[in-house]
Image (spheres, grey):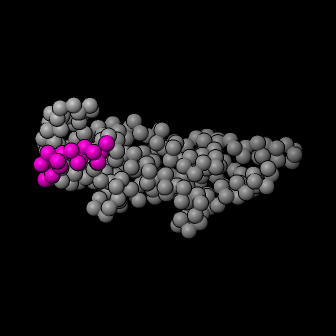
C-alpha cells in the first residue's frame, strides 16, 4: 500500500488536478504557487514598461515615436522639405499619445496577466527558456490586447491633434516624385502595435532578469518559485 501511494505521489508531480494542486517530489510547491510566481514576474515587467512610458522623455527609444520603415531617412527628407517644426510636433504628440494610451490601458494589461490560464505552469517555469512566460503571455494575449488597446490609441491620437499634423507630413512626403514607399495615411495601428510590442520587451527583460539574477527576486514568492526552477535546472545538469 505504501509503495502504491509513493508511486501515485511521484506520478502526480507534473499533473494538475481540478483543485489546482501540483506537488513536486519534495511536496513543497503547488501549481497555484507556480502560476502566481509567473504572473508576479510578468506584472513586474509590465510595471517597468508603465514607468518607462510615463516618462517618455528620458531618452528611451522604445517609448518614443519613430516613423515606420526607414525612420531616419523619412525624417531627414521631411526636414529637408522645410517641415522641421511639423516633424517635431508630430514626434512629440505621437510620443505623448503612446504614453497616455499605455497609462489608460494599464488595467487591460494587468487583467490580461491576472486572467491568463497557465495549465502548463510547471512546463513554462522549468523550460530553461528565459522568456518562456513572456512568450506564452504574448501568444495568448496579443490579439485581445490589440482589440482593447486600439480604441484607446485612436482616442488619444485624436485628442492630442497628432493625426492632423501627421496627415500634413504624409501628404508632403507622398507628393515627392519617385518615392517608392508612401507613408501610410494613418499610424494608429502602427502606434498600437509598437506600444504593445514595447511592453512585451519590458516583460521579457524582467523575466530574464528574475530567472538569472537572485537580487531581482524581490518577493518571497519569486524567491520560492524561481529558486525551485534553479534547483530543478541544477538537478538536470547533474543528471546529464
Quarter where residue 49 is shown? bottom left
Q: Residue furthest bottom?
A: 215
Report if residue 220 is visible in the image. no
Residue at image location 60% in from the left, 41% down from the top:
120
Quarter where residue 151 is shown? top left
Judged by its main secondary structure, the magenta piece is helix
110 in the magenta segment: no
Estimate the x, y position of residue 81 in percent, counting from the top left. Answer: 14, 45
Question: Residue 209 versus residue 217: which sits nearer the camera?
Answer: 209
Question: Residue 109 versus residue 94: which sits nearer the camera?
Answer: 94
Estimate the x, y position of residue 155 in percent, counting from the top left. Answer: 20, 43
Q: How many marks on residues?
A: 0
Estimate the x, y position of residue 97 in percent, counting from the top left. Answer: 23, 50
| For residue 37, side relative to residue 152 (left or right) | right
Report if residue 11 is visible in the image. yes
Span of residues in magenta: 70-85
Residue at image location 31% in from the left, 64% down from the top:
58
Amino acid at each position: 500500500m505504501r509503495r502504491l501511494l509513493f508511486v501515485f505521489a511521484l506520478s502526480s508531480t507534473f499533473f494538475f488536478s481540478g483543485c489546482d494542486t501540483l506537488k513536486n517530489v519534495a511536496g513543497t510547491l503547488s501549481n497555484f504557487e507556480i502560476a502566481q510566481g509567473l504572473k508576479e514576474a510578468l506584472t513586474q515587467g509590465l510595471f517597468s514598461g508603465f514607468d518607462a512610458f510615463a516618462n517618455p522623455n528620458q531618452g528611451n527609444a522604445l517609448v518614443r515615436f519613430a516613423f515606420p520603415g526607414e525612420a531616419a531617412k523619412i525624417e531627414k527628407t521631411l526636414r529637408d522639405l522645410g517641415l522641421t517644426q511639423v516633424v517635431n510636433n508630430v514626434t512629440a504628440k505621437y510620443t505623448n499619445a503612446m504614453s497616455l494610451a499605455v497609462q489608460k490601458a494599464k488595467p487591460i494589461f494587468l487583467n490580461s496577466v491576472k486572467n491568463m490560464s497557465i495549465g502548463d505552469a510547471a512546463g513554462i517555469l522549468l523550460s530553461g527558456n528565459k522568456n518562456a512566460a513572456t512568450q506564452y503571455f504574448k501568444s495568448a494575449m496579443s490579439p485581445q490586447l490589440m482589440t482593447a488597446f486600439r480604441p484607446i490609441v485612436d482616442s488619444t491620437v485624436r485628442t492630442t491633434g497628432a493625426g492632423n499634423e501627421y496627415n500634413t507630413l504624409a501628404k508632403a512626403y507622398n507628393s515627392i516624385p519617385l518615392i517608392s514607399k508612401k507613408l501610410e495615411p494613418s499610424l494608429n495601428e502602427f502606434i498600437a502595435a509598437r506600444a504593445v510590442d514595447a511592453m512585451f520587451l519590458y516583460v521579457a527583460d524582467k523575466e530574464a532578469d528574475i530567472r538569472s539574477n537572485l537580487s531581482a527576486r524581490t518577493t518571497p514568492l519569486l524567491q520560492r518559485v524561481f529558486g525551485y526552477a534553479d534547483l530543478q535546472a541544477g538537478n538536470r545538469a547533474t543528471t546529464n
